[in-house]
Image (cartoon, grey):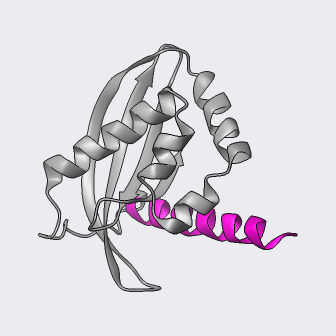
Amino acid sequence: MSKSKIKSICILVLSLIICFGVLAGCGQKLSSDFDEAEVKSAAENVITLVNEKDSEGLREMSTVQMKEGLTDDLLNKVYEAIGEGGAFKNVENMGVAGMTNKENNEELAVVVAKAKYENKSFTYTISFTKDMKLAGLYYK
């Protein structure tokens, strides 16, 4: 397995750990270093970029690690899965929490957003660094 594939898998695993922690209620209060409205707006932007299949837009707003993990193959799988939901309708609700990455003690803002589509809904878990770089993206 190539070094870049291993790195991609590691990034996705880290993102999943962050997402499951928030979904399980392990999130903490959002750090005062973040503006909740800005975090929500950035999360809506990520969802829009996913719906528009804008891989470059997603990479531009990502951390270095996420850029490396957001391969064309991976993103095409995401777009295909989301596409099964039909046309995007709206974001029904959104919650924001804080989290500390235990590997590097970095504060993160984590958004859990329920997005309604024509045929089904998806729950996105999106995390950002203090400089508003996309640090994690998960959907189910």
Q: Is residue 27 above or below residue 82?
A: below
- Residue 91 belongs to the span the image colors magenta: no
- In the rendered image, residue 56, in percent from the top left (x then y), is placed at 53, 42
Quadrant into which the C terminus falls: top right
Q: Nearer the viewer, residue 12 or 20?
A: 12
- In the rendered image, residue 136, in percent from the top left (x then y), is placed at 47, 58
- In the rendered image, residue 51, in percent from the top left (x then y), is placed at 49, 27
- Residue 3 belongs to the span the image colors magenta: yes
Prevailing secondary structure class for the magenta stretch in the rendered image: helix
- In the rendered image, residue 103, in percent from the top left (x then y), is placed at 47, 85
What is the span of residues highlighted in magenta in the rendered image?
1-22
Q: Is residue 17 visible?
A: no
Q: Nearer the viewer, residue 76 or 120?
A: 76
Q: Is residue 36 visible?
A: yes
- Which residue: 70% across, 38% down? 77
Answer with left or right where residue 63 lies relative to residue 44.
right
Quadrant hosting residue 29: bottom left
- Which residue: 18% across, 49% down? 38
- Which residue: 55% across, 58% down? 67
Q: Nearer the viewer, residue 124 or 69?
A: 69
